[in-house]
Amino acid sequence: MRDLIKEAIADLKKGDGFIYVTSDGSKIDLHEAATKGIAVTPVNPKDQVIKKLEAAGLHLNDGRFLNELNELISLVTGSGAAAKTSKRRTFSDAEKSKIVEEWKKVEAAGKKTKAAFAREIGVGYQTFINWLRG
């Protein structure tokens, strides 16, 4: 499980925004594939990570599961009292702009609803709509 989480973090931190996979599903560096003449498919690392974590029993798109997991972590680490008194997350104007730009890309691809995207980033639907209105 630890290796899966480390791999997921590494995939999500890649700067180019995509990972590349061969026809058999193996990850490969784009330059290596080009050198060897191997055909690759660009894949959104978030989608890959979500699939792998769900296969391992971690359903991160399920809000109820996430709340239970966060509660478990806070109880195990002894920060349960702090978790109950935590403040709501605030976003800077730059963060809001970046999220709205990301939404435009997702919307152009037609992959998610506004509500699903808002849940994924941890923002209320109405708050997200207000950001879109500017």
Image (cartoon, rainbow, N blue to C red):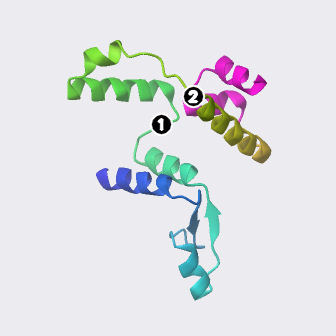
Residue at the spot of label 1: 60
Residue 125 is inside the magenta segment: yes
Q: Is residue 111 visible?
A: no
Q: Quadrant of residue 6?
A: bottom left
Q: In this view, does 21 lie above or below 84?
A: below
Amino acid at dot 1: Leu
In percent of width and height, residue 50 lies at: 51, 46
Q: Is residue 22 visible?
A: yes
Amino acid at dot 2: Ser
In depth, the one of 55 and 47 nearer the eye is 47
| Mark sitting on residue 92 | 2
122 with respect to 7 (left or right): right
Say few, some or many: other residues with alpha carbon within 10 Å of mark 1 (under 14 / 14 to 19 / 20 or more): some
Say few, some or many: other residues with alpha carbon within 10 Å of mark 2 (under 14 / 14 to 19 / 20 or more): few
In percent of width and height, residue 8 lies at: 43, 53
Q: Is residue 90 above or below residue 84?
A: below
63 with respect to 112 (left or right): left
Give the SS element for disc 2: loop
In depth, the one of 112 and 11 nearer the eye is 11
